[in-house]
Amino acid sequence: MKWMGLNEIREKYLRFFESKGHLRLPSFPLVPINDNSLLLINSGMAPMKKFFL
């Protein structure tokens, strides 16, 4: 088996799904940009959002 680096494995994975008709989108950050309130939603604190904001 040929040794592959992380970027090669990722590219192969993405190409596989593209070949099945899936759309490749750019990566999204884990922490939302310019909306700190979404961190409350992701942590399950949506009912408390009005108190924190």
Image (cartoon, rainbow, N blue to C red):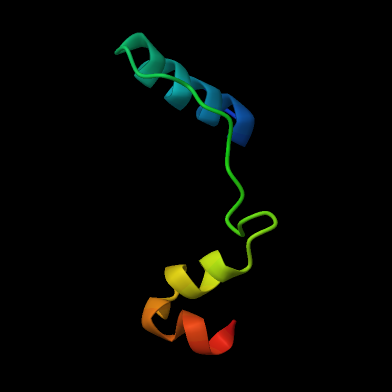
Residue 33 image-quadrant placement:
bottom right
Quarter placement of the C terminus: bottom right
Residue drawn 42% across the image and 80% down it: 45
From the viewer's side, name the closer residue of 40 and 30. Answer: 40
Q: Position of residue 14 (x, y in %)?
A: 46, 23
Extreme-bottom residue of the structure: 51
Left or right: 29 in relation to 10: right
Is residue 1 visible from the viewing direction of this image? Answer: no
Is residue 7 visible from the viewing direction of this image? Answer: yes
Q: Is residue 50 above or below residue 29?
A: below
Q: Is residue 18 above or below residue 48?
A: above
From the viewer's side, name the closer residue of 18 and 2. Answer: 18
Residue 11 image-quadrant placement:
top right
Residue drawn 50% across the image and 75% down it: 40
Q: Is residue 11 above or below residue 5?
A: above
Quarter placement of the N terminus: top left
